[in-house]
Image: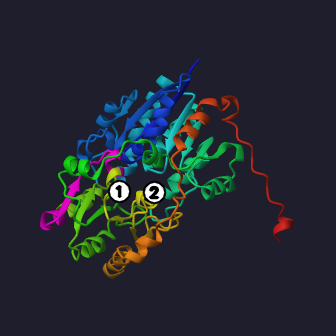
Amino acid sequence: MKRRIAVVTTSRADYGHLYWPLFELSHRADVELGLVVLGSHLSAEFGMTVEQIEQDGFPIIARIECLLSSDSDVGMAKTIGLATLGLADALDSWRPDILLLIADRYEMLAPASVALALRIPIAHIEGGEVSQGAIDDAVRNALTKLAHLHFTSTALSRRRVIAMGEESWRVHHAGAPAIDHLRRSKLYTREQLEQRLSLDLTHTTILVAFHPVTIHRDTTDEAEALFSALSHLSEQILFVYPNSDAGSRSLIMHTRKFAALADKARVFINLDPVTYWSLLGNVDLLIGNSSSGIMESASYALPTVNIGMRQQGREQPQNIVNAEANQSSILDAIHRAQTEAFRSSLKDMINPYGCGHAAERIADVLATVPLDRLLIKQPVQPIDETEVR
């Protein structure tokens, strides 16, 4: 019988990371693949990105309406509850052999909790990383302890997962699957991007990817410094929409207000993964606090200014220039990132998050790992206290 593997996707960002693992799984004769789509994928406000999944042809077994039209942390908490209710019925109806989750979005707590109750083994991608400025950090660690298989992006992340008490045979260093786009996707040329997005990329262009800092009570308190710094720039500035977190609508309003007053600013509600990846290869600078600035920009040796504490603690490649969340620090970081000396220093850099072969590794393990040994984990051996005194 084919092995049933269900995959949960909640946003454009995680779908971009999941595309090539989904492709690999969908082309295996020994796997029956089913996607559970929820969250911002089903929101017109965030671009109705479920349409991209439909266009790509992956089989959707359930659509869970759960994202509240809210801008608060209470809305996030209620979204988890609504997702849990919908997922309980969906996963009970389809009963996969393995449920695949990715990363650290708060909505992922819902499918993990449901799978735990239904005794469905969980596989998790991108555990062992650190992002101290977001609740994502705690979510990621919770998913790690609930999961039975792990696919880490870096060797350091694998060691962290094992240090959390996970048996080493369960933890696979696969690399970040988003990097597979660089090797496998047919990316757009500059001319194609210009036509597709109605842009002139011969101008110096800055891409901004900035999200609410969800560990703060005021999740957008670092945004004022960003927009203040951007107001001093003369370059063309492109914004992508933030995640659907508490404060995202306030941030969107601020972004649109800024763009309306700027001569060379554009706002994109949604960029599909291939367009976004292509853009990373054709802009001059990335600014923000997105994980894509840490993980994906490195494959292009793209100078990146990382602002504030959202990505604090994450393993960083050498193309990153960190800035505190104040105008002068951001402007200083932008200036350094734009110097010829800094750009030249990135010439032979290597992306620590992988080389574009994650999807094959992930799909092979999911399709072949013995199911009968997944659910019961062996306890961690206690430390001999006499050895640490």
Label 1 amino acid?
Leu
Q: Does 12 sit above or below residue 375?
A: below
Q: Position of residue 233 (x, y in %)?
A: 23, 74
Which quadrant of the view contains residue 261?
A: bottom left
Q: Which residue is under mark 1?
A: 280
Q: Secondary structure at mark 1?
A: helix
Image quadrant containing the N terminus:
top right
- Marks 1 and 2, Cα distance to the nearest angstrom? 9 Å
Q: Which residue is under mark 2?
A: 299
Q: Residue furthest right?
A: 386
Q: Position of residue 389 (x, y in %)?
A: 83, 71
Q: Does 46 sit above or below residue 55?
A: below
Between 312 and 272, the one lying in front of the other is 272
Magenta stretch: give its range.
Answer: 257-277
Which quadrant of the view contains residue 148?
A: top right
Q: Residue furthest top?
A: 1
Sequence order check, earlier mark of 1 and 2: 1
